[in-house]
Amino acid sequence: MTDYSKIDFSPLIAASADEVITESFVRDVALPSGGTLALITIDNGRDHTRPSTLGPRTLEALSTVLDALTQRAAAGEITAVAITGKPFIFAAGADLSKVSTLATPENARLMAQYGHFVLGKFKTVGVPSFAFVNGLALGGAMEIALHCDYRTLDSSAAALAFPEVFLGIIPGWGGATLVPNLIGIENALEVVVSNPLKNNRMLKPAQALELGLFDKMFGAASFIEQSVAWSDQVVSGGLKVNRPNVPGKLERLTKWPAAIKIARDTLKARIGTAAIAPYVALDLLSAAKDGDIERGFEREDDALAALISGDQFAASIYAFDLVQKRAKRPAGAPDKALAKPVKKVGVIGAGLMASQFALLFARKLRVPVLITDLDQSRVDKGISYIRGEIDKLEQKGRLSPDDANQVRALIHGTTDKTEYADCDWVIEAVFEELGVKQQVFAEIEPIISETAILATNTSSLSVHEIGANLAHPERLVGFHFFNPVAVMPLIEVVKTPDTDDATLSTAMQTARKLGKSAVITADRPGFVVNRLLAKVMGEAARALDEGTPMPVVERALAPIGLPMGPFELIDLVGWKVAAHVQDTMVHAFPERFYASENLHKLAEIESPLSKTKMGKVEDLSKAAKKALTLGKVAVTETEILTRVENELAGEIKLMLDEGVVAAAEDIDLCLIFGAGWPFQAGGTTPYLDRVGASERVFGGTFHDPRIAGHN
């Protein structure tokens, strides 16, 4: 077994000279029954908006403190050790920026081993150890708690999670071994694998307690005091801690292998096999069945060393930085002080998309929302849908009864367009046809106030042309949502040559208040996401038209790790919508976009695809096969993938030359948020650099070769 105390960690420490150290401060707390608890508080010295992180020098400081406490325990000076965090925050886990800069194979292994070495000291300190988790705890912070003998939890803790798989690595400081041996394999699979892949879902405190990750939960008002009193009961022997989810022999023999197999099959169906980390995590959880903790830590060392020094982790960190930093400081956004207040919203239309808009605006902005349509029956249908969705949110506990009643009361439907007169923001969600959109704005503009802003949700039409007949085109902006509106995090904010800064600023601030990430794009056909998806869909249609079997086309993009194949995506978007977007792009750039008559034929068939129970595309339906005219020259998966990569590289280069967005990073952000581009592939542009498409198409790269693992 590895003796971590004999490893030289000095190269890792030396390479971390610029780390912001989270210090470990110790104070003695007298226990009610006698004796002393040494309470460690980890604190990076910054305000609560900058969570404490765990880099090599932070671990070194904690190690020094634990060594001193071990000596005190041996001398009989203390009877227990506990660790907590600064107010509201336990810790945010490993310092990912530091991990990514130290990601040589040698340093990667040292980082894994150093975590095991330092955190393992909680088990050897010589007295019972406790974790008082008083707030946010992610990744390595959760592993600190796991290494302690006992754990208490603040009921107001903001977030608890093991997000590592989401970022292309695994919980490698003990999590992959300790979690399944504490809460059972099925719970561990949910926490370590499933939740990270569900947009990094966090645990609520009550869930974490129920799973068995913690032993006791207390309220925030006196959390530390109650935790100290509880720990005294444990130390004095008067309290026995029961952990009902600890796996027994029967679970290890029967349930464990079955659960791993089901999880592996589910993963393959949901995300394919391109992402490495989820499968490595599965392997570690499977091996943890042996209950050998030391051997488990060695397996984690091997896994973490390989993953940290691999391309997918570097790509994930690039994507993570985009989402955490660039998305919060959008390129080209005007001063937010220019934004106008939005106190009432008008939605033109009462169809599905319009109804989703109305609910989102009412729920997030908590302002009155008006919807209209051509007749009262359509309005009533829209209102009925909205109320049904509010009922669902209330039943799921996502809206309290009071909030649900408030949101219901805020939404009003009518056919009387004069009620738009006092709206500050009016967005249209009518049929995707230029003349129709121009007509509704022609009717509305004379009614609304001079300061009101007009927004269009067009997916690919020219915003400038939509506003060509407006008296005040400067107050028109594109505001393109993605379906489903409540779930998809992206809004493309489209700036025309006429859009003024006040309008643009209001749009950006409104998007932020809606909980969305906004990227500013120029008014070019398809904007960003649909322009590039049209390339993907076009190449899929081309391959099908040539005679390539549908299953081959669906599998072709699997190496990228996209959440679904191209035809499954078209089916989700809607065949008529996809055909319309394709037509728009072919009309704008006939020499570059592929037109497929078969795509239009498929749009007229009620069920064009044959699918599995999991919703994956198996083939064309019988009706579709009869309706289509296909060639007889099939192409390979490799050829389809290369075509898509080359077409994307060429189109993105043109988009950047045209100034559609400020930089390649904005393209990447749009595809991560708007098209589900996987984190482990990084942004689209680093991926195209890595696979050589950029070099093949324009003889260069989008990024410096060091970005996102490109060598």
Image (cartoon, rainbow, N blue to C red):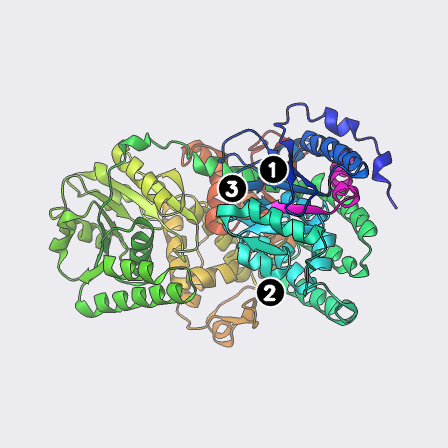
Q: Determine if the magenta segment contains residue 110.
A: yes
Amino acid type shown at disc 1: Asp
Vertical position of residue 585 compared to residue 572: above or below = above
Secondary-structure class at tag 3: loop
> Which quarter of the rendering shows the C terminus?
top right
- For the residues marked 1 and 3, what is the alpha-carbon distance in whole angstroms? 41 Å
Q: Amino acid at mark 2?
A: Pro
The image shows residue 535 at horizontal and vertical percentages of 48, 49
Q: CA distance from mark 2 to mark 3?
A: 50 Å
Q: Main secondary structure of the magenta part?
A: helix
Query: Label 1's element?
Result: helix
Q: Is residue 138 above or below residue 578?
A: above
Amino acid type, residue under disc 3 in the picture: Phe
Are there few (<14), some (14-19), or many (20+) residues within 10 Å of tag 2? some
Q: Label 1: which residue?
A: 689
Q: Nearer the viewer, mark 2 or mark 3?
A: 3
Is residue 577 positioned above or below 6 on the image? below
Residue 179 figure quarter: bottom right
Left or right, 547 with respect to 3, comes to left
Earlier-in-chain disc, 2 versus 3: 3
Q: Earlier in the sequence, mark 1 or mark 2?
A: 2
Residue 59 shows in this picture? yes
Which stretch appears magenta?
Answer: 104-132
Quarter of the rendering containing residue 12: top right
The image position of residue 616, as x and y in percent, is 56, 66
User: Viewer-proximal residue, 74 or 707?
Assistant: 74
- Residue 551 marker: 2
Within 10 Å of the Cα at label 3, are there few (<14), some (14-19), or many (20+) other Cα atoms?
some
**x%, y% of residue 360?**
33, 54
